[in-house]
Image: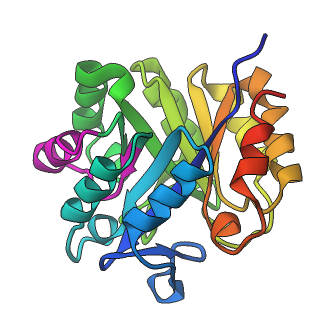
């Protein structure tokens, strides 16, 4: 029996609010209220995992660790935390929230030796958040550009990275569907587990991603489609065992 497909509803925090952005643009934010209330809503629907993003940390203009801690304290889900985790201090702050896993993004391209050391030290508690635009990795809230994404993924795979969270920037927040071609290319260069993010708009999209489990796709992050009602999370979770 294959492993269940994991769905991770997203709670992105910006200035104390749960928000969703389009292609990462700060001025595109749609607000959806209290992040704790949002997380509890997805928990009531049956989610076992939560994708929690400190957007303030990602953009570097402030941070939301107090809100992150409040969300994690309020839920019984396992939580992966992303956003602005680029050095010892921010990694320690993230780990201290009680999260199950920390996603390192920008540091993978700006400080790869540190990132390698953190993967070696924390193993499964570290995943790499690889945000892809025009086949290249982008960072700092998607405003800086790094090397070719597949090269970065292949390189970190050799250093033992257990999991990559792959976001297709062009589709993120657009409800245009996931970039299946990119995900297949990623799976071809790594044996690590892969979580897909960006563009998911329907149960059909989730089913299409679940078919890629044999390639290494472990699950998917869902954001805008949940908040706008395109996907009912309870129905989506019912697909996990199929």
Looking at the image, which is closer to me, 8 or 42?
Answer: 42
Q: In the image, residue 17 lies at what x, y percent?
A: 38, 77
| Percent x, y of residue 23 | 59, 73
Say if 222 sits above or below 193 in the image.
below
Q: Residue furthest left?
A: 89
Residue 205: percent from left, percent from top: 83, 51
Q: Quadrant of the C terminus?
A: top right
Judge whether residue 141 can be spotted in this image.
no
Residue that sits furthest to the top in the current view? 1
Q: Tell me what residue is drawn at x 48 percent, y 75 percent.
A: 19
Up the image or down, 228 lies above or below 219; here it is: below
x 44%, y 40%: residue = 77
User: Percent x, y for residue 211?
Assistant: 85, 32
* Residue 11 appears left or right of 70: right
Q: Is residue 208 magenta?
A: no
Task: Write the residue at 28% across / 36% down.
Answer: 115
Q: Nearer the viewer, residue 112 or 31?
A: 31
| Quarter placement of the N terminus | top right
Residue 82, placed above or below residue 112:
below
Which residue is at the front of the view, 69 or 110? 69
Q: Does the magenta portion include 82?
A: yes
The answer to whether any part of residue 147 appears in the image is: yes
Query: What colouring method underlies this structural image?
Result: rainbow
* Nearer to us in this view, 82 or 154: 82
**Magenta-highlighted residues:** 80-98
Tell me if 104 is positioned left or right of 200 in this view: left
The quadrant in which residue 192 appears is top right
Label tally: 0
Q: Spot the residue most to the front.
A: 44
């Amino acid at each position: 029996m294959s492993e269940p497909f994991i769905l991770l509803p997203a709670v992105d925090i910006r200035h104390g609010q749960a928000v969703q952005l389009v292609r990462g643009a700060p001025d595109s934010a749609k607000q959806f209220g209290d992040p704790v209330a949002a997380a509890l809503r997805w928990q009531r629907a049956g989610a076992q995992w939560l994708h929690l993003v400190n957007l303030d940390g990602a953009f570097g203009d402030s941070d939301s660790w107090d809100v992150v801690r409040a969300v994690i304290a309020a839920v019984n889900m396992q939580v992966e935390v992303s956003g602005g985790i680029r050095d010892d201090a921010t990694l320690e702050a993230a780990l201290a929230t009680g999260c199950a896993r920390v996603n390192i993004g920008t540091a993978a391209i700006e400080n790869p030796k540190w990132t390698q050391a953190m993967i070696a030290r924390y193993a499964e508690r570290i995943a790499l958040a690889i945000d892809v635009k025009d086949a290249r990795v982008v960072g700092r809230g998607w405003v800086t550009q790094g090397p070719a994404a597949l090269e970065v993924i292949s390189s970190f795979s050799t250093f033992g990275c257990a999991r990559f969270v792959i976001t297709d920037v062009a589709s993120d927040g657009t409800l245009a569907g996931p970039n299946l071609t990119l995900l297949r290319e990623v799976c071809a260069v790594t044996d690590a587990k892969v979580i897909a993010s960006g563009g998911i708009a329907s149960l059909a999209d989730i089913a299409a991603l679940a078919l890629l489990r044999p390639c290494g796709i472990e699950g998917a992050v869902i954001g805008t489609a949940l908040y706008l009602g395109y996907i009912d999370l309870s129905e989506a979770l019912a697909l996990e065992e199929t």
